[in-house]
Amino acid sequence: MTGAAWDAFWSTLPAEPGAALWDSSPLLTAARHLPLFRGHADPSLPLVDIGCGSGRQTQWLARHFPEVVGLDIAEAAVELAAASHAAPNVAYRRADLLDQDTVAALRAEFGDVNVYMRGVLHQLAPDDRARMLTTIGLLLGRAGVLFAQELTERTGWYVAELLAGGAQLPKTAGLAAHFDFGTRIAPADDGRLRLLFEGSGFDVVADGDIALHTTERTSGGHPLELPTRYLVARASARL
Ligand SMILES: C[S@@+](CC[C@H](N)C(=O)[O-])C[C@H]1O[C@@H](n2cnc3c(N)ncnc32)[C@H](O)[C@@H]1O
């Protein structure tokens, strides 16, 4: 998806917390992710949240790192994050993480950082996915650690089957209609997220299945959970 499409998405979204499908409570999200990567990370480094969206997870993560920077390609997302999820040690900025000059400037400003990235890779074209991995490697440097949660092909099948079965999931159906969510999902299969990072010179220190809690309620009244993958990695000396 382009920056303009993301800007249009965030500008037309209602302002209340959780309006986006993935904008779940941090207690069900970042708070469950931190234990998966805290033991591998240097907590004295800054944390960069790539594609921070509303900033809901960013703000929670800022309790655990000295300095947190939420970056998003959509100006509307950055404005929403600054208005709704501010904290004294958080800065939100508009940044296209596929832009080399932007990444070089971030690297010069912050040095090695930890990186948090949730739900960004799957919506990028294959070439852009490779560029995003280059970005992450540059930002991590020798000392940083990445935590990523990503949708896979299994997420796509799951969503497609739910919708085909007539499930009443308006947010999910809206995303499926506008962004091909549920059909155009990458990385292609569950093991591929790890292969993608290993093939780009990262050392993967942990990965596994993890639920993505959404803000959509099923007909049974439970929050819809999607099957996704997580991964913790360092940039290896080869990068
Ligand atoms: C599915 S949302 C996830 C938001 C947030 N990480 C969360 O979990 O709530 C993906 C976000 O990535 C942002 N994004 C997409 N491409 C980007 C890029 N090239 N650089 C920075 N942000 C990007 C979008 O604007 C969007 O806010």
Image (cartoon, helix red, strand yellow):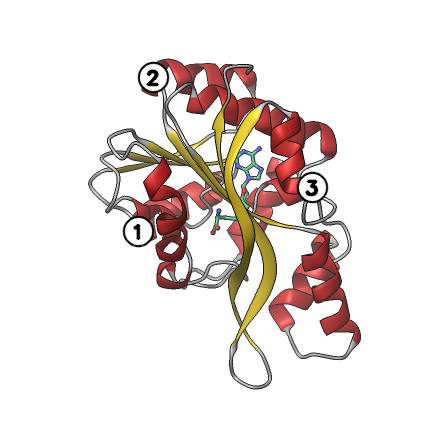
**Camera sees residue 231:** no
Kindly identify the residue that appears in the image at 63 percent across and 24 percent down: 200
| Residue marked by disc 2 | 109
User: Considering only order in the chain, which callout, 1 or 3, is on the residue closer to the N terminus?
Assistant: 1
User: Considering only order in the chain, which callout, 2 or 3, is on the residue closer to the N terminus?
Assistant: 2
Q: From this view, report whether residue 87 is shown above or below residue 22.
A: above
Front position in the image: 235 or 48: 235
Quadrant (top left, top right, bottom left, bottom right) of the N terminus: top right
From mark 3 to mark 1, how far is it between C-alphas? 29 Å
| Residue marked by disc 1 | 60
From mark 2 to mark 1, how far is it between C-alphas? 23 Å
| Disc 3 residue type (three-letter) | Arg
x and y, in percent, of residue 53 in the image: 47, 47
**Camera sees residue 194:** yes
Kindly indicate whether the residue at mark 1 contacts the one at mark 2 (C-beta within 8 angstroms). no
Query: Which residue appears farthest toward the left when viewing the image?
Result: 88
Label 1 crowd bin: few (<14), some (14–19), many (20+), radius 10 Å: some
| Disc 1 residue type (three-letter) | Trp
Residue 192: image tag? 3
